[in-house]
């Protein structure tokens, strides 16, 4: 892959910020210009470190030994970006072998044995993002066709967990009962996965109007109804994930990231995992960098990735976090997902495939299916469609607001 030269881009962090205020009025705009973040050799070394954590059956576990689909797939994408195609193929095979007949994966598998049987909706949906990432990187249509049944089953399972308000419940037990608890971070990630799934469907000549409607209702819930989601505001992921997932972009996205900057960002170290603990974590810092880049704050994004390099170990692996009051690594572990997040963030900053994937290039717009007369409504039986949103909101201004956000995105990119 190309060296991670941070491009000098126009956007809210250059010149003047949204609203006409001087750019230097906020920390997002005060980051120094940066050049090379990581070299190609360093990326390959980090991919090697992830591969060294992989188990013989292809699973890529947490430090505690359990594997779940979301982090496994994040690591798979990083392996491919780092040139470890052998390990990535084993990872894909593990995923295929462990999908259950209902389209889900168990929440936790240890050494090939299922330890937690319930299914996490976000974990299951992420396969669509990973398949779309593979397509954007390789153009391998045969791979897409092979994985299409996997994506279709997984997203059908996830959409089946959608609540009337548009939010998607966090988990489903083995008895088929959903846990009526919606997570802002998870639902934001699911929104992007649904859009990627629609892109995959189009590649294989299929339509999925139910996914279009589900994505639109979910996007509206994320944009307009914070009361639908569990109160987990102490977690930094809830702060930036609506931007990564695409629910908030443009000026809305910038304002979101500015809103809690001082709560989470520790200059020179990264960002806190939770707002009430003296603990910065590498994966969250790199995910914030992706979100920043997506709203045009590339300089601040590069600063984030540079600042968290104190977590890099001698072999290219990364410590999970740093307790900055006690001055020690916390927890005392090196995690595969942290290394993967670094690779994906650097590729985003370099203008690689990850940037295109999370920017949503060639994916259908969010909220489009709420527009009156949209073909997705006509393609479904009447009992599966709704003329208005269940929350009572009028779809027309919702769609108009999203169109304005799309324009903001174009101006910032």
Image (cartoon, grey):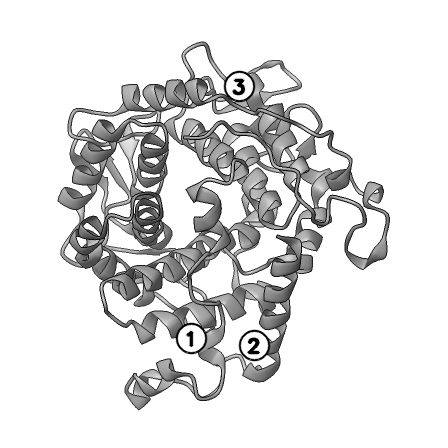
Q: Nearer the viewer, residue 182 or 4?
A: 4
- Residue at 64 percent across and 40 percent down: it is 298
Residue located beneath label 2 in the image: 399
Left or right, residue 25 beside residue 102: right
Left or right, residue 34 beside residue 202: right
Whichever of callouts 2 and 3 sits on the residue coming sooner in the sequence is 3
- In this rendering, is residue 31 above or below 247? above
**Badge 1: residue crowd in 10 Å (few <14, some 14–19, many ≥20):** few
Secondary structure, mark 2, is: helix
Whichever of callouts 3 and 1 sits on the residue coming sooner in the sequence is 1
Q: Quadrant of the N terminus?
A: top left
Residue located beneath label 3 in the image: 311
Q: Nearer the viewer, residue 356 or 75?
A: 356
- Measured as percent of width and height from the top left, residue 29 is found at 76, 40
- Residue at 62 percent across and 13 percent down: it is 327
- In this rendering, is residue 40 above or below 172? above
């Amino acid at each position: 892959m190309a060296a991670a030269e941070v491009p000098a881009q126009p956007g809210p962090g250059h010149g003047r910020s949204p609203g006409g205020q001087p750019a230097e009025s906020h920390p997002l705009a005060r980051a120094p210009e940066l050049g090379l973040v990581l070299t190609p050799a360093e990326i390959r070394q980090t991919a090697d470190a992830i591969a060294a954590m992989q188990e013989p059956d292809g699973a890529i576990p947490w430090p505690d030994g359990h594997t779940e689909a979301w982090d496994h797939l994040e690591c798979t994408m990083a392996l491919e970006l780092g040139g470890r195609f052998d390990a990535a193929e084993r990872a894909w095979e593990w995923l295929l072998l462990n999908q259950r007949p209902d389209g889900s994966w168990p929440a936790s598998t240890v050494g090939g044995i299922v330890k937690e049987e319930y299914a996490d909706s976000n974990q299951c949906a992420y396969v669509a993002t990973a398949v779309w990432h593979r397509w954007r990187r390789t153009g391998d249509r045969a791979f897409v066709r092979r994985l299409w049944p996997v994506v279709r089953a997984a997203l059908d399972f996830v959409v089946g967990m959608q609540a009337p308000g548009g939010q998607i419940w966090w988990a489903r037990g083995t008895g088929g009962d959903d846990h009526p608890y919606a997570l802002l971070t998870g639902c934001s990630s699911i929104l992007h996965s649904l859009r990627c799934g629609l892109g995959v469907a189009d590649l294989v000549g299929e339509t999925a109007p139910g996914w279009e409607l589900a994505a639109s209702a979910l996007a509206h819930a994320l944009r307009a109804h914070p009361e639908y989601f569990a109160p987990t505001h102490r977690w930094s992921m809830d702060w930036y994930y609506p931007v990564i997932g695409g629910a908030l972009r443009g000026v809305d996205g910038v304002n979101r990231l500015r809103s809690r900057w001082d709560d989470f960002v520790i200059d020179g170290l990264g960002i806190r995992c939770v707002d009430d603990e003296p603990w910065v974590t590498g994966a969250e810092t790199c995910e914030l960098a992706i979100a920043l880049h997506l709203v045009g704050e590339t300089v601040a994004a590069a600063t984030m990735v540079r600042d968290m390099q104190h977590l890099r170990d001698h072999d290219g692996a990364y410590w999970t976090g740093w307790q900055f009051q006690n001055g020690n690594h916390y927890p005392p572990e090196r995690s595969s997902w942290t290394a993967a997040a670094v690779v994906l963030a650097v590729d985003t900053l370099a203008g690689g495939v990850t940037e295109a994937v999370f920017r949503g290039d060639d994916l259908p717009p969010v909220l489009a299916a709420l527009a009156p007369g949209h073909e997705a409504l006509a393609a479904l039986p009447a009992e599966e469609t709704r003329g208005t949103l269940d929350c009572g909101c009028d779809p027309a201004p919702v769609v108009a607001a999203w169109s304005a956000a799309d324009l903001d995105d174009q101006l910032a990119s």
